[in-house]
Image: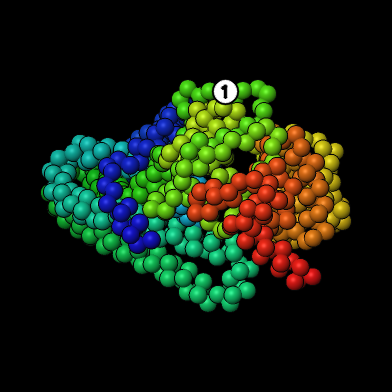
Amino acid sequence: MAQAVSERDRSRRVGALAALWPFLSPYRALLMAALAALVLTASVSLMLPIAVRRVVDGFETSAVALLDEYFIAALGLAALLAVGTGLRYYLVTRLGERVVADIRKAVFDRVIGLSPAFYERIMTGEVLSRITTDTTVILSVVGSSVSVALRNVLILIGGLALLFWTSAKLAGLVLLIVPAIIVPIVVLGRRLRVLSRQNQDWIAASSGSASEALLAVQAVQAYTHERASRRAFADVTERSFDAARKRIGVRAVMTVIVILLVFSGIIGVLWVGARDVRAEAMSVGELVQFVIYAVMVAGSVGALSEIWGELQRAAGATERLVELLGTTDAVQDPPAPRALPKPVLGRVTLENVTFRYPSRPEDAALEGVSVDIEPGETVALVGPSGAGKTTVIQLLLRFYDPQGGAVRLDGVDLREMVRADFRRAIAVVPQDPVIFATTARENIRFGRPEASDAEVEAAARAAAAHDFLADLPQGYDTEVGERGVMLSGGQKQRVAIARAILRDAPVLLLDEATSALDAESEAAVQRAVDRLSRDRTTLVVAHRLATVKRADRILVFDRGRIVAEGTHDRLVAQGGLYARLARLQFTEGIAAE
């Protein structure tokens, strides 16, 4: 993580916040209305000191009616300021919420479609941190800080102009301290940006650490790993705090320097102004007006110095989100895709496929693998762990692209088609079933969202899942909890199989689909799979050879290659790896009985 932080800190993109413009531009009307309200409130604020001067100097006149008019005018300006400020708050806050909602959707839309290679480089918790924490930082800027910054810029510029109009002599003295204020803002602001980015990175790491531990909380507790998990999370959190402490310290120093210089200058100018009033070179009202403008200018400078730190922090958050939005995926749809032939027959072909995982480029997961699977054929992939069986499944789903050779469906290279197009023709049951925190019915319907309740229940019956689902407190409409915590391992597997049955796809991929089932459930599910696979191309990945004995063909994998091929009986008769695996498993099974 430290290395990742250091690499990210090297980024020095100027104007990173400009990347927010594509999200702001669709709301130009709202943006212009907010700017109009902002200009209105800034203008009214600059007019108030003039009204105050008139009121102060009005005490010296005997025209009571004129004095009343000054007070009424001042009250009117105050009312206008209140209405304009409320309108500005509403428009700017609404704009900020809208833009951040769009950013969150855009980032999620991007990351949900990225291939698994992306998630080999970054933790899911860090991605979630960027979607939540970083966008919250941007919300505070777009919905508040930018508006306040622009208002203070207008007040600063207008206030300086009106200072010269009120007293050029005193205004000249004020300008003498401006360079002394700007220098620490610029110098310390750069440091703030680096520290803000580092702080956000460690927050993301903290989120990732917590997410990983909580998702595996049962394993953590079973292996009494709570203390180590707490220590790891505390370490990352403390690093985040240290980065935040440094950022806060730099910002505090900058605030002290700016405020000290600003108010020292104001006091000096007031001393000169008081002497001019005594010399009758200016009226009391003019001095009061100048003082108010000076305070407004000083306040705007101080506010800008604080907002600058927020903008630096938001720039770091924006860069991190832009990184996600601009991530180049290793797997992409072609610019001119070919259509999958209709109807889909389900012929699967691997032509001299060689593949290495991005995280392990030195080891070939598959090397020179060629196989042609006819429509409706059931082919089993067997072999020791790490032999390349599941890799075949991942290439068929085009989670990765092979470095050599081609993977084809009905004669068309997967790389020539839109991924969503050919994936609709595939149903998959993974080794670790994915169960969502919703009802059992919706978990099965995930396979085909438009399916009716009757079709969902029919799929559950075919997967031997109906009985236990019907026995749940609310039946099929029972919430099964995060990751299906209410279901056993075997029940989760049967729900996943029901989902694949409901999808009714011409190609069926079973990756250890019966590994978590007891003998009775396995027999029931195997019968359902046999019926399901009759008219479908089926690839079965299995360690337990008893589940693949009836396959039309068995491909034996070892170290990324196909080392044998044939039926169960033929492979046993040939000897070799398959015969050895069969002898071990069936002998153990007999001994266990």
Left or right: 544 in relation to 40: right
| Residue 228 visible in the current orientation | yes
- As helix, strand or loop, the secondary structure at mark 1 comes to loop
Left or right: where 462 falls relative to 155: right
Q: How is the image coloured?
A: rainbow
Q: Nearer the viewer, residue 357 or 300?
A: 357
Q: Residue at x 50, y 28 (%)?
A: 416
Q: Residue at x 58, y 44 (%)?
A: 393
Residue 59, placed above or below residue 474: above
Q: Residue at x 59, y 57 (%)?
A: 577
From the viewer's side, name the closer residue of 274 and 295: 295
Question: Is residue 143 visible to us here?
Answer: no
Residue 593 at x, y = what percent?
A: 79, 70
Tell me which corner region of the image, top left, top right, bottom left or bottom right, holds residue 14.
top left
In this view, the residue in front, 28 or 564, is 564
Tell how many labels: 1
At label 1, which amino acid type do we have?
A: Ala
Tell me: residue 272, above or below residue 458.
Answer: below
Residue 441, given in percent of the width and then of the height, sits at 78, 46
Relative to 220, does residue 43 appear above or below in the rendering?
Answer: above
From the top left corner, tell me how far across and down residue 544 is, in percent.
68, 58
The residue labelled by disc 1 is 339
**Could you tell whether 463 is left or right of 201 in the image?**
right
Indicate the position of residue 266 as horizontal and vertical percent values: 21, 54
Which quadrant of the rendered structure holds the N terminus?
bottom left
**Quarter of the image where one finds residue 3:** bottom left
Residue drawn at x 71%, y 51% as measured from the top left: 569
